[in-house]
Image (cartoon, coloured by chain):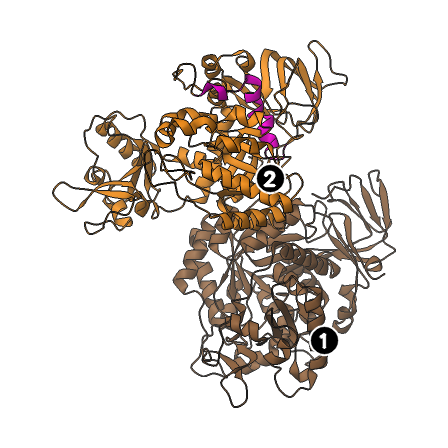
Chain colours: A orange, B brown
Amino acid sequence: MPAPALADTHIDNIEGISVARDGSIDRFGGMVVDEDGRISELLDFGDRPTREIDYRIDGEGRVVVPGFVDGHLHVMDIGLGTLVLDLSETNSLQEALSRIASYAAAYPDRPWIIGRGWNQERWGLGRFPTAAELDAITSDRPIWLERVDGHAGWGNSMALAAGNITAETKDPVGGRIERLEGSRAPSGVLVDTAMEMVDNAVPPPLPEDRDLAFYNAQRLLLRHGITAVADMGTSVEDWMTFRRAGDAGRLQMRVMSYADSVDTMLLIGGPAPTQWLYDDRLRLNGVKLYLDGALGSRGALLKADYSDDHGNRGLPILNGTQLRNLMSRAALDNFQVAVHAIGDAANADALNAIEELSRDYSGDRRWRIEHAQIVDSADLPRFGEHGVIASMQPVHQTSDMMMAEARLGEVRLGGAYAWRSILQAGGKLAFGTDAPVEPVDPMAGLAVAISRTNADGEPFGGWHPDEAINREQALAAYTAGAAYAGFAEGRFGSLAEGERADFVFLSADPLMANAADMRKIEVLETWIAGQRVFDVEIESR
Amino acid sequence: MPAPALADTHIDNIEGISVARDGSIDRFGGMVVDEDGRISELLDFGDRPTREIDYRIDGEGRVVVPGFVDGHLHVMDIGLGTLVLDLSETNSLQEALSRIASYAAAYPDRPWIIGRGWNQERWGLGRFPTAAELDAITSDRPIWLERVDGHAGWGNSMALAAGNITAETKDPVGGRIERLEGSRAPSGVLVDTAMEMVDNAVPPPLPEDRDLAFYNAQRLLLRHGITAVADMGTSVEDWMTFRRAGDAGRLQMRVMSYADSVDTMLLIGGPAPTQWLYDDRLRLNGVKLYLDGALGSRGALLKADYSDDHGNRGLPILNGTQLRNLMSRAALDNFQVAVHAIGDAANADALNAIEELSRDYSGDRRWRIEHAQIVDSADLPRFGEHGVIASMQPVHQTSDMMMAEARLGEVRLGGAYAWRSILQAGGKLAFGTDAPVEPVDPMAGLAVAISRTNADGEPFGGWHPDEAINREQALAAYTAGAAYAGFAEGRFGSLAEGERADFVFLSADPLMANAADMRKIEVLETWIAGQRVFDVEIESR
């Protein structure tokens, strides 16, 4: 475990902002952090600590907010993504091939060369690349590279062989094997579900790669001022990685974990959620369940047909009975339940299930609905009942708005990304990013939340701007709200006395910024439990 | 974690015995335990501590030895065994049926009634019991009861159905389905490998049962003065159970864990053995590998045919290549390797593999051979090379001696249970019990080690008495030796300054006892890290 500071520290001369879950704000000028890393005293501007202190840190008048809490992301996916070859900045096939060759030479022991981010449009290639072009680099190790949008994969001949893909292989349902012109022979690119044949042959990460991935993910998150996360879909391997980090004193951020299945949940937690481990740095809260798919692939469950695919209302991942059985098994032993629901039918059924289960499982359950993207307006008030938490990702709104219009048509968008309506109904908001699906940057999330516009300021005036919320509400959903959603209030999230001193120095006051300025706010320093874990000056040297 | 004593404690007025791995003994009259539970000072008889102390414990002149370290057992099997119905004391079928009915009534939620210990000979029944007799108790839950020797199982009709056993089912190789007289219909008892059909249908323990099982196992071990164990074959479920105990401050004893496979080892440890967790109470040291079976079932690998089964030399569980590959994978990342080897051929091959691997994997590896029961005399000197540890269970010698003579004939017994020869060759001994295969009682192990006789004093003069060792060597193998075998020297096992204060008050001095008296020595109190965790006076009230 990290050594406690073993001293009382006075963080002085700051523009401190503490945030309650309801969006109410207190401003303060300094704080005292005790030897356990907890805030023992918040000080008015100019006030001195009431107790003797050992150290004084001069905040130089900078803005301090609670450390950001990302309420929905995938720690290990973020981290493992940092270990693969990134081709997203390449501007020609030639440049990409050169990068691949360098990478292969740099990592002679990796059994596969894995990468992502290529885009033949950006290269101006006018065609897909081929296996033969990769074979020229190496034919003794598989190379497997995902396209920028995740919907195609490019492999060398060894990768195709590992997926058992030959001229005889038929295109799978929902996918396509690109063929050489005038031939059945695979050309090297696999589209959509055809990718799975090679994906399934990719060996799992090595244990040391998992530890490195965790380290990289944590660094990235701390750099963005994120001091706590909800990890959605923790596998046993992921959990062991978190514990190794905790055991070795390398776990700095706080992880609220939701197991990837009821089996994993029971394996880790046994008869109950785990303790808060490593001084409030890790806890298995419960389980993540998938009720439907996503809008992009038309897997989200809708009450009526997709506007751009008549006859299709999405695909359920769990049926209603399965969902209720799994929720019940978790709730029986006080595990928290987080249900992925994107379409309006999925959200309605998740709310139905919560309503039904609340009869047997009373008390403070904090049922979570993850994403809650498309909600029938008639269902919005139900977020105010049974303590339901809407765990939402503001940036999804701007990433998805064009697609949502195409999939749903204008008339069904009244309850889309409906942060304000959910708050008004008495629902509880927790904000996050779904990283690596979206970048981890909380400033982008805050900017979208208050403006309903993307980084280009589009659409002018905001998309369905009635659902924007104010700065205080947005900051609360990204701090105290997301902490509450993981039963962490009183431990972190608010910058209140008695909580762990997790905070961030910002380059400007987010409660005074417009959306454009919000995106420019920099994280200068990140502190967890009264210890500095990121300093932009040191890292940028 | 358990609260530290937060005070310096003087354990005064004791007949203290500290033990080095080589069997050398120091006697002392008191010790000072610091606030971390470590021994800060050993005191001569009558000496006062050099530092001021907060508490004084009067040992009343009693004998104190290091806490016993059981070098090979199965924690969860011990614990799960406590949860099932114990029929070993029943004296008639009627009494057994009555016990089964009470148990079924007491545990209405258990999906299966599981028990063990029945013996139709003890009942004077003159036949095996039947499924019908159990059906009269309950036919809506399976009942499955193991015979006292583990070689037969007695089920009701639901248990037989769960194993898909019908009149049409043929006897499997190595097993027998008992049939009703004059019929092919199964009578209810399954012998040897036929048991597996039902065993495989038994549901895994509930998470809360695992935690209870661990608690029971720990209590049993502490009651016998065992303060540390090597858990041989830790599954992921077992490990999670240990961690839950540690996280909740319920882990009192020290567990050195050997994973049940290389996969489990890598899942838990990742790129290396874990840290010592919970103040030296848990560590994943490495992996347990099985090279052969056991003597009883003639699975132990022999250099020549079994004397009582010509043409049979046992069955290898791993071939030589597999063994070396797995050992190599573990050693690559400094995981410790413990190889189960019982027969002389298995021991020879384990020694060969260690010799070969020692070339690539140098340094302090502490290769372990578990059991090392039957060793070709020609191979005994090889235990002195490459730091090999012989992890042996003295009580196996008296349990197995008749069988060993039948299986091997007199001429091959020169290197059987050869503790003295292994020590003389420079090998390192670690003693344990293989519990629940043998009872956990260390006094029985010490008595056998010094006498080669069983609890009845048989055979007179001892079985191959040349291989008996002296009291000091036996105590060392059961304390410092077993600690060293798990890389724990300096942490516990010797009662030396700087080590954790793990010790036991005994009713008499084991270094002054003959074998018969040794078995009568009682554990009065057990202390771990300077805290009392068992007190016979309190427990027997």
How many other residues sit within 10 Å of disc 1, few (<14), some (14-19) or many (≥20)? some
Residue at (53%, 12%) from the top-left corner? A508
Magenta region: A464-488
Q: Residue furthest bottom?
A: B182
The chief SS type of the magenta part is helix
Identify the disc placed on residue A283: 2
Residue at (18%, 49%) from the top-left corner? A167
Q: Does residue B227 appear anywhere in the picture?
A: yes
Instruction: Describe residue A425's horizontal placement relative to residue A76 as left or right.
Output: right
In the image, residue B309 above or below residue B239: below
Is residue A480 a member of the stretch shown in magenta?
yes
User: How far across and how far down the image is residue B415, in percent?
Assistant: 55, 73
Residue at (65%, 30%) from the top-left corner? A489
- Foreground disc of the pair 1, 2: 1
Task: Decide which of A535, A343 is in the foreground and name it.
Answer: A343
Instruction: Describe residue B12's horizontal placement relative to residue A246 as left or right.
Output: right
Task: Decide which of A259, A347 is in the foreground and name it.
Answer: A347
Q: Which chain does the numbered disc 1 sit on?
A: B
Q: Does residue B363 appear anywhere in the picture?
A: no
In the image, residue B530 above or below residue A297: below
Q: Name which quarter of the figure residue B34 lies in.
A: top right
Q: Tag 2, which secondary structure? A: strand
- Count of marks placed on residues: 2
Instruction: Verify CB contact (< 8 Å) between mark 1 and mark 2.
Output: no
Residue matched to label 1: B98
